[in-house]
Amino acid sequence: MSNPLQAEFGETIAALADALAADNEGAFFAELDGLLQRRERMLFLDLRKLTGDLQSALQRFRMDSRLMDLAQKDVPDARLRLDHVLRLTDEAAHRTLDLVEQSGPIAERTAQAANDLMEPWQQFRDRKIAAEDFHRMVRKMDAFLLATSSDMDKVREHLSEVLLAQGYQDLSGQIIRGVMKLVTELEIALVDLVRLSQTGARTARQVSDETRRGLGPQIPGIKTSPAVSGQQDVDALLSGLGV
Amino acid sequence: MSKNLRFLVVDDFSTMRRIVKNLLNDLGYANVVEADDGNSAWPLLQAGNVDFLVTDWNMPGMPGLELLKQVRADPKLAKMPVLMLTAEAKREQIIEAAQAGVNGYVIKPFTAITLKEKIDKILGVAS
């Protein structure tokens, strides 16, 4: 029983050997040329098949992979998002520090004014105060009460603003979550790419549409569908809708 | 009397819940409960201990829009005042919230005055 190689080349090799033994140069080279051409054709067919495989693999990958999108759009967007987080945290920290710095002197002034009143007040309590000192103390007390009332309003206002400034944590947290989701998607796409390059097989990716859950804060520099620019816009839009 | 209103603040970020709770306290509303998403808010609403709902949109579990729709679909809760307090800023989202029956929409970051104005408007209080 002949093996495939013998089936394929046996006849030609035999003819080649015969031509060699007979010293028939014309027949020998004719057989040799035929052999080489067949070999070339086989190589060409193999190469074409390989190219076709590669092309369809690339095509398939390009068609349904998120990797292109991720690399070209989402990753640069993520950089912008993280940059925005940096800005939000920076602004909130500075806002908070400003308010603390503004409140400190007010508290100090109030404490100082109270201290200044203590001595004459003690003299008054001990019934040892001179009439002139008493009048001075009363004037001081008037000013103190007035100043404290307005100063404490100011401090209260500052505290309320410090409170609101902490809202950055929610906004930046939402953005960071979005970037974490992107990293997960990137990981899935890369694992797919590795798998594809190894076996040519592909798996279904789970890229969920989370629009219903919300899209998170607007990021300056990232273009999306029309968004409002602030509360005034929201109010105008809603009043147009009768809300 | 309106100062005795019971508020439910729904937000997945505890910092934001604290901020809103403090602001509500400043406005004189001392009765504030919290939940971190629609799913945990629902039993509180069902128990009937809430007069006014303030909710975020973007939350894991049940998002705010779904909570709003669920509230409007429930005969017991359908008339509950609902204020959305969210970073979601797409026009189509605001329209969707309006169509779902939201009473007010405050966009984050917001100010204490905006929050007060919207609550007053919903309650029909002259500010």
Image: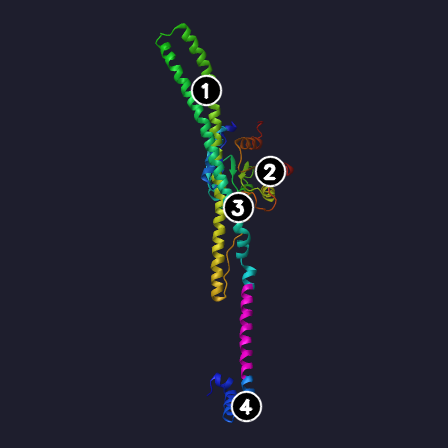
B46 and B85: which is toward the camera: B85
Q: Nearer the viewer, mark 1 or mark 2?
A: 1
Question: Tag 4's secondary structure?
Answer: helix
**Distance from the alpha carbon under mark 4 to that under mark 1:** 121 Å
Q: In this orientation, does residue A113 appear?
A: yes
Q: CA distance from mark 2 to mark 4?
A: 94 Å
**Magenta stretch?**
A35-58
Do callouts 4 and 1 point to residues on the same chain? yes
Q: Are marks 4 and 1 in contact (CB under 8 Å)?
A: no
- Hey, what amino acid is under mark 3? Leu
| Residue A234 tag number | 2
Q: CA distance from mark 1 to mark 2?
A: 39 Å
Amino acid type, residue under disc 2 in the picture = Val
User: Badge 1, how many Cα within 10 Å: few under 14, some, many 20+?
Assistant: some
Q: Which residue is mark 4?
A: A25
Point 52% across, 51% down: residue: A75
Find disc 3 in the rendering and name its residue: A80
